[in-house]
Image: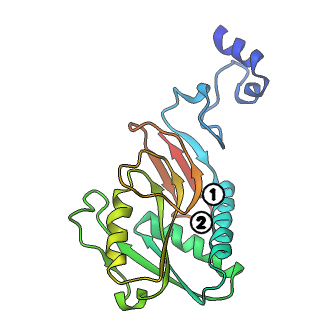
Amino acid sequence: MIETASRAATFPKLKILLGKTGQIKKNPQICDNQPWYMQNESRHLILDNRQITQKIRRIAFQICERNFEEKEIIVAGIAPQGYLFAELLLSELKQILPITWKLVKLNIDKQNPATSPVTLDVPTEQLHGKTIILADDVLYTGKTFCFAIRSILDVHPKRLQTAVIVDRGHQEFPIAADYVGYALSTTVRQHVDVHLENPQQLAVYLQ
């Protein structure tokens, strides 16, 4: 307790996280990094509903700025969470750029992407010669993206770009997202938990 109070005196901003007893409050909202006083928390909020909405809107603007000459763009979401992200992203895109937008669901086993069949909810011919935005909630090792991209390349798209809400690093494959909502430094033992099921209760947790 003495050490915590001492650090609070040294760092005035820490006082807003402390109660009357000097104990750190649970699950404060962390926006830019993981400070020392959260290292013992088993689970804490990284992005809340407002922040996620803002980041998705920013990604939408970036996509439109980069592809404003296109007449049609396909947003393909890797199910399940990537597809939910794609739905939210598409809602923002339609408000910015008045072109033809199409939503596609891509199914792949994220635990075994190398041996998993990749399926789409539309005929593959619809992707031929089109600009495609491949979306997922988190970029980690890049393995899922790698094998998902390989299957899309088989249909010869015009252009393929990638978008994620969180890039947590630790890539093991030569994959980088073109559009990133939030870059987060993590350890391999930590888990990023993204909640997109309820559009009114979006959240990203680190545990």
Name the residue located 32 percent from the left edge and 75 percent from the top edge.
Answer: 151
Q: Residue 109 carries which label?
A: none
Identify the element where label 1 is drawn: helix
Query: Which label lies toward us, 1 or 2?
Result: 1
Mark identifier at residue 199: 2
Estimate the x, y position of residue 128 in percent, counting from the top left.
Answer: 41, 88
- Separation of disc 1 and disc 2 at Cα? 10 Å
Earlier in the chain: of badge 1 and badge 2, it is: 1
Query: What crowding class fits label 2: few (fewer than 14 Cα within 10 Å), some (14-19), or many (20 or more)?
Result: few
- The amino acid type found where label 2 is placed reads Pro
- Taking the image as shown, residue 56 lies to the left or right of residue 125, namely right
Q: Where is residue 18 in the image (x, y as percent from the top left)?
A: 70, 25
Q: What residue type is labelled 1?
A: Ile
> Which disc is residue 52 wearing?
1
**In which image quadrant can residue 26 be found?**
top right
Instruction: Give the crowd class for mark 1: few <14, some 14-19, many >=20 residues within 10 Å.
Output: many
- Apparent side of residue 207 relative to residue 121 in the rendered image (left or right): right
